[in-house]
Amino acid sequence: MANENVYDPNLTLDEIVFENRNKEYGAYDLRHQYPKLLTKSFIVGTALFLIAALSPFIYLTIKRLTEPEKQEVKADLVEILQEDKVIEQPKEEEPPPPPPPKEEEKIEIIQNVVPEPVKAPKIETPPPPISKQLETTTGLVNQEGVKAPAYTPPPPPPSTGTKASTAEVKPQVSDTQVYTEVEQTAEFPGGINAFRNKVSSNFDGSAMNGDEGTVKTEITFVVERDGSITDVKASGGNSDFNAEAIRTIKSIKNKWTPAKINGQSVRYRFRLPLTMNFEG
């Protein structure tokens, strides 16, 4: 009879635990397959972690390999044509018409002519008969004489009043209105050529594709009363060129000398045509 307390040293722990038991039960199979499942899970989990960690680097490497080569764009500022107006010059004011010749004032002199008295013709009446004369009583009788016409003094001559002096009244200057015609235009420090050089040096040609050729636009902006720039707009046909031109103008922080009317600073709209040539 074999000793039941003696175990075969070649048996595993699972075989020892489940000896003389139903090994078809699920617990024995799970314990028997556990090392293999653990190893497989570890390998699969490690592989998924490596894929998740390395996927950004793989994506960037593929994108870098498939990215087309960059083309250098050469942007040169083309000299502005002479026929393009840089700014609107103020119109020369026509000289005022000469004043009409001054007419001498006519003073009407009214003469007061007093008519000369004319003696009334003496009417001789025949004396009454003697019988009547004897009946009358002689004496002094007050008789009312003929009144002379009342003297009316002549009216005074019309007074020559002093004419009101007409002084030239200058038009009032608005602080909010944007003018296009002024007496003194706005100026950039160093002149308009210095402003063009600023635009050329600050313009970023990488915003363009490089095959546009010659591109034109007209830039307008308002030079404020303090010399700053506002309301920058571009009216060209290429939207990318317009956007970069607006950005370039806004990046120039130099103060302008404001435009003036009657010696007062006013808001002035400045126009600048811009032409550039792009070669791929």
Image (cartoon, helix red, strand yellow):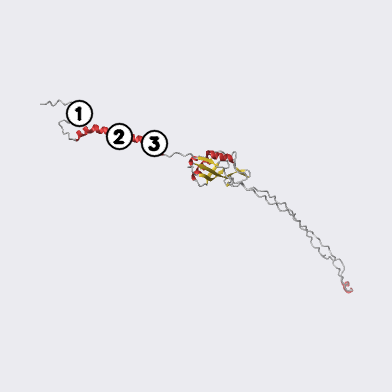
Give the x, y percent position of residue 166.
68, 50
Q: Earlier in the sequence, mark 1 or mark 3?
A: 1
Is there CB contact under 8 Å for labels 3 and 2? no
The answer to whether 58 appears left or right of 85 in the picture is left
On residue 61, which mark appears?
3
Q: Quadrant of the N terminus?
A: top left
- The residue wearing badge 2 is 45
For marks 1 and 3, give the CA distance.
51 Å
The amino acid on which the numbered mark 2 sits, given as a three-letter code, is: Gly
SS for callout 3: helix
Give the x, y percent position of residue 279.
50, 42
For marks 3 and 2, give the CA distance.
24 Å
- Using the rendered view, name the quadrant where residue 193 is placed: top right
SS for callout 1: helix
Image: 189 above or below 112: above
Give the x, y percent position of residue 183.
62, 45
Q: Earlier in the sequence, mark 3 or mark 2?
A: 2
Residue in the foreground of this view, choosing between 130 and 218: 218
- The residue wearing badge 1 is 13
Image: 17 above or below 87: above
- Using the rendered view, name the quadrant where residue 29 is placed: top left
Question: Which numbered mark, 1 or 3, is in the foreground of this view?
Answer: 3
The amino acid on which the numbered mark 3 sits, given as a three-letter code, is: Thr
Image: 126 above or below 192: below
Give the x, y percent position of residue 214.
52, 44
Residue in the foreground of this view, choosing between 266 and 21: 21
